[in-house]
Amino acid sequence: AQSVSQHNHHVILSEAASLELGCNYSYGGTVNLFWYVQYPGQHLQLLLKYFSGDPLVKGIKGFEAEFIKSKFSFNLRKPSVQWSDTAEYFCAVNALAGNTPLVFGKGTRLSVIA
Amino acid sequence: EAGVAQSPRYKIIEKRQSVAFWCNPISGHATLYWYQQILGQGPKLLIQFQNNGVVDDSQLPKDRFSAERLKGVDSTLKIQPAKLEDSAVYLCASSLAGGPSSGNTIYFGEGSWLTVV
């Protein structure tokens, strides 16, 4: 079965700082990888996804993530955060084989301060 | 395009009472999921439907939780009797047939917040 580890529980950054949130997964086969974001009071929404091809994936709002297969990692990055990026970020994985659901990490809370 | 609709948004019940949550997925989405999200944790799958059939319910506590999707459209999740540890947000989500394994995005509703006292 798949599992996901997110290294940081709570990250606090100043505006314009660079962001990197760690995500590692455990699964022996081929996977699809996702980052979801949950803004305060809103529902989970897809930030970006990796299915195949270029391991550097660009998502909405200037976010990107890089899939490093040898490290089983899919870290999320943003060069310069804004106050509006304050949210909870979830990494998720699903196995390519079969109609399998998403398995989520515990999430990282990002607080951006002025 | 209308999103995934859930109701009620908030519910407070006493332990040993029952509660039911309703979900209407995005039109045309054959796959429907119920996730449980306990405070401080990521969402955990309870049950997955493909049309009106169950694909995966391995993590559903079947002694107290039940779910149905009789006509392959909307779905109901029931808890009876509720325990204190059932306090969580219950998320409904949907996707086109085959889910993310087939390259489809999963869309989430706003969730139903349950507090058991």
Image (cartoon, grey):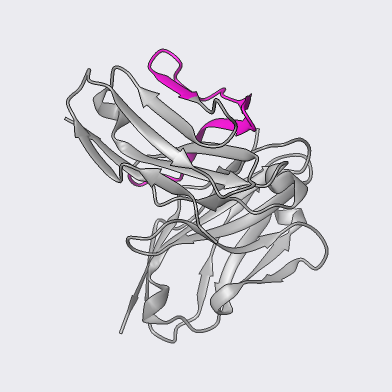
Q: Number of callouts in the render?
A: 0
Q: Where is residue B104 shown, x and y percent of the image? A: 70, 52
Q: Where is residue A25 shown, x and y percent of the image? A: 63, 47
- Which image quarter: residue A101? top right
Q: Is B113 part of what is drawn in magenta?
A: no
Furthest residue toward right: A53
Q: Is B49 part of what is drawn in magenta?
A: yes
Q: Image point 44% across, 87% down: which residue?
A: A16
Magenta extent? B39-67
Q: Is residue B70 above or below residue A86?
A: above
- Which image quarter: residue A79? bottom right
Q: Where is residue B84 shown, x and y percent of the image? A: 24, 27
Q: Image point 62% across, 56% down: which residue?
A: A34
- Which image quarter: residue A22? bottom right
Q: Image point 57% across, 59% down: which residue?
A: A35
Q: Nearer the viewer, residue B24 or A29?
A: B24
Query: Which quadrant is the C terminus of chain B positioned in?
Result: top left
Q: Nearer the viewer, residue A6 or B112?
A: B112
Furthest residue toward front: B71
Left or right relative to A29: residue A79: left
Query: Which quadrant is the N terminus of chain B positioned in?
Result: bottom right
Q: Nearer the viewer, residue B112 or A83?
A: B112
